[in-house]
């Protein structure tokens, strides 16, 4: 009850209450002193000297006015002290905010206070840190986009120039033409994924939901990727419970295709991939585990970043946007995705999707 009325220890509310209490006490004490010094003594003296009520009335009026003026002056001084104490940190934070608004993310506030201002300073510093990180990500994104688009375009341009040479053989013409086709497909895939990721980033929820057979989708994704895993002679160990999920069928299917394709890409020749689907409490848990090259610890924090590729030797096989797209789809589906990995041992991707039911029955209470 005491903290509710007067505020917590070291809080602005407690300090203001204390200052106002002191101010009121000062005013009260000043008024009492003024009364006894300026009014009471003069009244007694006038009664003794004049014995006239008119002069007594004027004396009382004059001293009451003087007391009121003293009270007003003291109150103004107290208010000024309080205002300056309150506004000083706010003005400093305002100036810091202006610097951040102008693009300076090196601003950092410091304080020795232990009240709400400290909380504000801590939150401000965290905000600036996050904004600085976003700024770096944006610059990195632009640099990566420029590089990823420039590389296939330069390649296409170079080999197109070579095709104009009349002295090249037919075999060379076919080789250069195939390279141009591959680079064109790579550029098309990059553009498609960039547009898809951009659309997903600006999407707040799944608009079209339907019942999805997750097990059937995973089997379909494995079948679709058969040319890739057959080439590496990979064995699949699949354990799938028949479970359903309400979501966007096309987007959820893309999650399994991207994750299984990644597992194939980083698996060793004659390797194996384990895929499990089960319900754990209120979630469907899907694990895709490979026994390939794995990742270093510092790579785990970057794999969902746009354009990040673990193995640069595979850079021609993708754009580095696949896992970023997967993560966004899972987030829109109100699920989570986690990754665990050990170098030269393998990687496990775990997707958790909430168990949901769809019904048109509305219960009105």
Image (cartoon, rainbow, N blue to C red):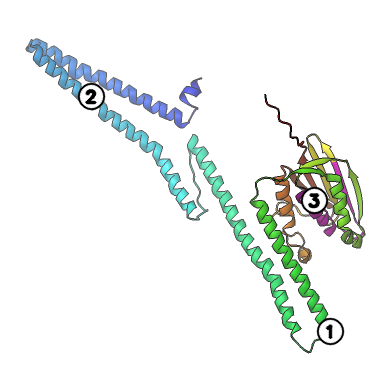
User: Which residue is rendered at x = 72% and y = 82% of the image?
Assistant: 161
Q: Secondary structure at mark 3?
A: helix
> In terms of image quadrants, where is residue 65?
top left
Q: Position of residue 310 (x, y in %)?
A: 75, 59
User: Which residue is rendered at x = 36% and y = 38% of the image?
Assistant: 84
Please tell me whether residue 235 belongs to the stretch shown in magenta: no
Residue 180 seen in the current view: yes
Callout in the foreground (2, 3): 3
Q: Position of residue 332 (x, y in %)?
A: 70, 46
Q: Position of residue 344 (x, y in %)?
A: 84, 55
Classify residue 170 as left or right of residue 137: right
Label 1 vs 2, first from the N-terminus: 2
3D distance between C-alphas at marks 2 and 3:
80 Å
Quick one: label 3, few (<14), some, or many (20+) residues within 10 Å?
some
Question: Is the Cβ of the residue at disc 2 closer than 8 Å to that at disc 3?
Answer: no
* Label of residue 253 in the image: 3
| Residues rendered magenta in the picture | 249-277
> In terms of image quadrants, where is residue 59?
top left
Position above or below: 194 against 284: below
Q: Position of residue 314 (x, y in %)?
A: 79, 64
Quick one: label 2, few (<14), some, or many (20+) residues within 10 Å?
some
Instruction: Tell me the residue that label 2 is attached to.
Output: 68
Label 2 vs 3, first from the N-terminus: 2
Instruction: Tell me the residue that label 1 is attached to.
Output: 170
Position above or below: 106 against 80: below
Callout in the foreground (1, 2): 1
Classify residue 195 as left or right of residue 94: right
Q: Secondary structure at mark 2?
A: helix
3D distance between C-alphas at marks 1 and 2:
108 Å
């Amino acid at each position: 009850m005491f903290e509710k009325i007067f505020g917590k220890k070291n809080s602005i509310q407690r300090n203001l209450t204390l200052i106002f209490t002191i101010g009121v006490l000062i005013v009260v004490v000043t008024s009492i002193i003024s009364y006894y010094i300026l009014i009471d003594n003069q009244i007694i003296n006038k009664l003794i000297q004049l014995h006239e009520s008119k002069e007594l009335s004027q004396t009382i009026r004059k001293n009451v006015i003087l007391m009121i003026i003293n009270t007003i002056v003291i109150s103004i001084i107290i208010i000024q002290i309080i205002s300056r104490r309150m506004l000083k940190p706010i003005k400093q934070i305002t100036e810091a905010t202006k610097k951040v608004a102008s693009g300076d993310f090196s601003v950092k506030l410091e304080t020795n206070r232990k009240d709400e201002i400290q909380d504000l300073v801590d939150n401000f510093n965290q905000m600036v840190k996050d904004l600085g990180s976003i700024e770096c990500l944006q610059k990195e994104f632009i640099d990566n986009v420029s590089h990823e688009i420039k590389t296939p375009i330069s390649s296409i341009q170079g080999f197109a120039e070579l095709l104009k040479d009349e002295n090249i053989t037919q075999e060379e013409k076919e080789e250069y033409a195939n390279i141009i086709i591959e680079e064109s497909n790579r550029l098309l895939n990059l553009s498609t994924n960039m547009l898809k990721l951009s659309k997903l980033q600006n999407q707040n929820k799944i608009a079209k939901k339907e019942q999805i057979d997750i097990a059937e989708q995973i089997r379909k994704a494995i079948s679709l990727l058969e040319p890739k895993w057959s080439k590496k002679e990979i064995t699949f160990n699949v354990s799938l419970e028949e479970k359903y999920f309400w979501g966007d069928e096309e987007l959820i299917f893309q999650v399994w295709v991207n994750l299984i394709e990644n597992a194939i890409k980083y698996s060793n020749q004659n390797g194996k991939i384990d895929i499990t689907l089960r319900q754990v409490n209120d979630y469907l848990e899907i694990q895709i585990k490979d026994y390939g090259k794995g990742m270093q610890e510092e790579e785990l924090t970057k794999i969902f970043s746009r354009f990040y590729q673990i193995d640069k030797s595979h850079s021609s096989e993708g754009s580095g946007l696949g896992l970023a797209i997967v993560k966004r789809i899972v987030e829109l589906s109100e699920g989570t995705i986690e990754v665990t990995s050990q170098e030269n041992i393998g990687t496990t991707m775990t997707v958790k999707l909430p168990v949901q039911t769809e019904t048109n029955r509305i219960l009105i209470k």
